[in-house]
Image (cartoon, rainbow, N blue to C red):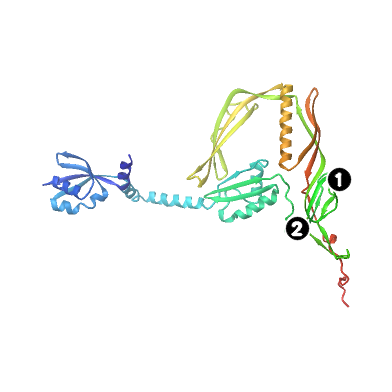
Amino acid sequence: MLIRFFKWFRGYLLVQLNGYSPERFINLCRNRNILIWDMCKGEDGYQCYMTLKGFLSIRPIAKKTKTKVRIVKRFGMPFFVHKMFKHKGFLVGICLFAAIVYTLSLFIWDITLEGNHSYTEDIIFKYLKEIQVEPGVMKRKLSCQDIEASIRKKYPDIGWVSAEIKGTKLNLKIVETNMPVPYDTSTTPCHLVASHDGVVYSIITRQGTPVVKKGTAVKKGDIIVSGVIDIILDNAEVINKEAVTADADVLLETTYQYSKKLPIQYSKHVYTGRKKKVYSVSLLNRTLNLQNPLKKLHSTKKYDIISSEKNLKLTNTFVLPVKFTSKTYKEYKEEPTSYSKEELVAKQNAYFSLYVKQLKEEGVQIKENHVKIKMDQKNCVSSGTLTVLEPVHETKKINETEWRIKKPDEHSGNDT
């Protein structure tokens, strides 16, 4: 199969051999490594196949053996291309296709997102649209560094962003961090303040002036470590003040309220078995539905819609602005039903475990758990308090009046 493909790719001929000594012609061709195959003898001489390259080199042999070589039929790509290029329409089509492909390659037609958990694709893509990053934008108008910086600024708990353009695709990768991001420690002087009411459990100060100590009760917004430090002489006289970024490891013992209500009764979806699959084609954000999805289904009924999308692409990185969508409409009816006590308890435990997991990811330590599950006739309620040790990360910008000392030689600016 591979040999046949190479023969077709390079081109070959069916030729008719006539003359006094075609056998000698064939022997000389073989001596010169000119490939000949499928030879047969007919009424008018011999017929055989030979490569296009071999045919172009047989003139001296044919002249020497006085053999007339006539082309019966041509095969392969070189002849196909030659034939096509004789048609002006084909040439115009090739040029038009190349121009369209080149033009499409100048734009972004697909955006992918990886690593998102708390932020859905809809949220991220909606923001990207606000900053004019969407399918159909020209690649030269995009800066991957600007996109990365914009996303980090908009969503502070996204700690890392990578934007990369490959072909007509913009690939985004993000890493979410649930830890609040403090001010830039190299540029912004700030205080460290309490994010909740509580009691200071521990404090280790690296930079700044501690305002509280272990066991001090604080209110939300109170300064725990001041970003203003005094510059003093040996005699304890304050000669100046300096604004820095307060930096400390602080654990605040505080109380979190937790509450989760689940209704005992709910509506269960029961599929009727009636369904309808429809297809649509989108070109440059314009959609054409190939048929009405509700034509054979009752328009007042309820449906679950299962959607599948596929982009047309030349390669994995060259995506075209053509999208095929398949939607399956599955009709269902709602039946009232109730959770069992075991199911409700299991659901509440799962929700609470997820809540605790999120707290631990934020560095919060659970000290005491006073959450209980109670049930009444309508609801199952999980509620109570958690005594936790919360790391303090909230900051407050320092005003210039907090640290600048007016010196004796400073005046209002009225010169005499």
Q: Is residue 288 left or right of residue 392?
A: left
Total marks placed: 2
Q: Position of residue 157 (x, y in %)?
A: 70, 47
Q: Crowding near pointer 1: few (<14 within 10 Å), some, many (20+)?
A: some
* 1 or 2: tag closer to the N-terminus: 2
Q: Position of residue 117 (x, y in %)?
A: 65, 40
Q: Position of residue 158 (x, y in %)?
A: 67, 47
For the point 42% across and 49% down, the residue is 93
Depth check: give the residue in front, 149 or 220: 220
- Numbered label attached to residue 188: 2
Q: Crowding near pointer 2: few (<14 within 10 Å), some, many (20+)?
A: some
Q: Is residue 389 left or right of residue 322?
A: right
- Numbered label attached to residue 344: none
Q: Position of residue 333 (x, y in %)?
A: 66, 23
Q: CA distance from mark 1 to mark 2?
A: 29 Å
Residue extending furthest toward the front:
234
Q: Is residue 310 left or right of residue 116?
A: left
Disc 1 and disc 2 in contact, CB within 8 angstroms: no
**Quadrant of the image for the C terminus?**
bottom right
**Quadrant of the image for the N terminus?**
top left
Depth check: give the residue in front, 390 or 260: 390
- Secondary element under disc 2, as helix, strand or loop, is loop
Q: Which residue is mark 1?
A: 215
Q: Amino acid at mark 1?
A: Gly
For the point 73% across and 25% down, the residue is 344
Q: Amino acid at mark 2?
A: Thr
Please name which of the two marks, 1 or 2, marks the residue nearer to the observer: 1
Depth check: give the residue in front, 39 or 354: 354
Residue extending furthest toward the bottom:
416
- Secondary element under disc 1, as helix, strand or loop, is loop
User: Residue 197 sits in which quadrant?
Assistant: top right
Determine whether 308 is above or below 50 in the image. above
